[in-house]
Amino acid sequence: MEIDIQPVNLETRTHFSDILEKASAWQKKHGSEGWNYPFDDEWMLPRIERGELFLAYLEELPVAAFRILWEDRPYWGAKETGESIYLHTFAVRRDKAGHGIGETVIDKIVEMGRKRNLVNIRLDCSLSSSRLIAYYERNGFASVGTTLMNGKMMNLMERPL
């Protein structure tokens, strides 16, 4: 599967927000905690400017959205050592889920980390999202701790690069 990763820009930001808002609604409908904030310009524009937001394309169709950080002290605290790439706000377009897109995108993010000679890919997800935790475990991630963030217990996960 040939997936192309591109930074989000002003013209593509609606694709980013659409994928994430639909994924969040789907998560909530199926008993998981979705994101608790809107993916509006107030949230997106500073992150676009910092180069954190990305879209994954399959045959020119945006099929996944995600955010990359190179440091994440708020979630990882003292475990933040500067040796990891951090995956946040990751979702596959609902009508394309289950076709290996998520796994392929994770592999592309692993390559982004390797190009910077990093050691791990890290992420967090709600501790109550057992389906999401199982998905990441199937993709080589292991739970390495928890943290309380904005009143929610978060599961910290990592995978060697």
Image: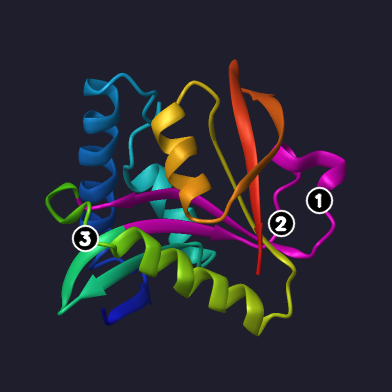
Q: Are marks 3 and 2 in contact (CB under 8 Å)?
A: no
Q: Are marks 2 and 1 in contact (CB under 8 Å)?
A: yes
The x and y percentages for residue 38 are 33, 34
Residue kind at label 2, given as amino acid type: Glu
Please tell me which of labels 3 and 2 falls first in the chain. 2
Relative to residue 30, is residue 26 depicted above or below? Answer: below
The x and y percentages for residue 101 are 29, 63
| In this picture, residue 134 sits left or right of residue 38 | right
| In this picture, residue 50 sits left or right of residue 26 | right
Please tell me which of labels 1 and 3 falls first in the chain. 1
Most foreground residue, 148 or 134: 134
* Label disc, if present, on residue 80 of the rendered structure: 1
Tag 3 secondary structure = loop
Separation of residues labelled 2 and 1 (CA atoms):
7 Å
- Region rendered in magenta: 65-93
Residue kind at label 3, given as amino acid type: His
Please tell me which of labels 2 and 1 falls first in the chain. 2
Relative to residue 60, is residue 70 depicted above or below? Answer: above
The x and y percentages for residue 111 are 55, 78
Tag 2 secondary structure = loop
Residue labelled with disc 2: 71
Q: Quadrant of residue 145?
A: top right
* Label disc, if present, on residue 112 of the rendered structure: none
Relative to residue 150, is residue 6 depicted above or below? Answer: below
Residue at the image position 42 percent from the left and 37 percent from the top = 132
- Inspect the magenta stretch and tell me whether residue 44 lies in it: no
Separation of residues labelled 1 and 3 (CA atoms):
33 Å
Residue labelled with disc 3: 99
Residue kind at label 1, given as amino acid type: Glu
